[in-house]
Amino acid sequence: MSVHNNEQENGACTNTDIEIWRKVEGDYYSPSIHVTEAGRIGIDVGGHVLVAPIENWHDAGSKIFTVNSELSEWRRKVAYWLLGWKI
């Protein structure tokens, strides 16, 4: 029987992600950052993992910077709404 997609014969999958940072070393539930086999960056906070290419993370960071810069109040509210943040 051949094994595909990192799946072992017992049905378990092999974790190919490379962890590059963990807030509390050794704490499995602690926020962490990893790189996937495909080269995407994954951020895990509270068991909710977001995975995206580095370009998307950079774009998200630039949007946050824009929100925090000198925007008029209504523009800041629109930006917060677009990012899904509470006002």
Image (cartoon, rainbow, N blue to C red):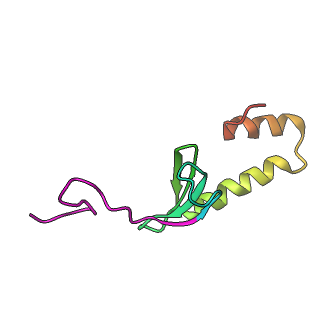
Query: Magenta region, mostly helix, strand or loop?
Result: loop
**In this image, 39 relative to 76: left or right?**
left
- Residue 55 pos. (x, y %): 59, 63
Screen quadrant of the C terminus? top right
Screen quadrant of the N terminus? bottom left
Residue drawn at 18 percent across, 64 percent down: 3
Residue drawn at 19 percent across, 55 percent down: 10
**In this image, 76 relative to 59: left or right?**
right
- Residue 17 pos. (x, y %): 44, 64
| Camera-nearest residue between 26 and 53 | 26
Residue drawn at 53 percent across, 44 percent down: 48
Total marks placed: 0
| Camera-nearest residue between 50 and 76 | 50
| Camera-nearest residue between 36 and 23 | 23
Q: Identify the residue at the far left of this view.
A: 1
- Residue 39 pos. (x, y %): 47, 68
**In this image, 52 relative to 11: left or right?**
right
Q: Identify the residue at the far top of this view.
A: 87
Looking at the image, is 56 positioned above or below residue 74? below
- Residue 79 pos. (x, y %): 75, 40
Looking at the image, is 82 positioned above or below residue 59? above
| Camera-nearest residue between 82 and 16 | 16
Judge whether residue 72 is colored magenta. no
Looking at the image, is 4 positioned above or below residue 12? below
Judge whether residue 13 is colored magenta. yes
Q: What stretch is highlighted in magenta?
A: 1-20
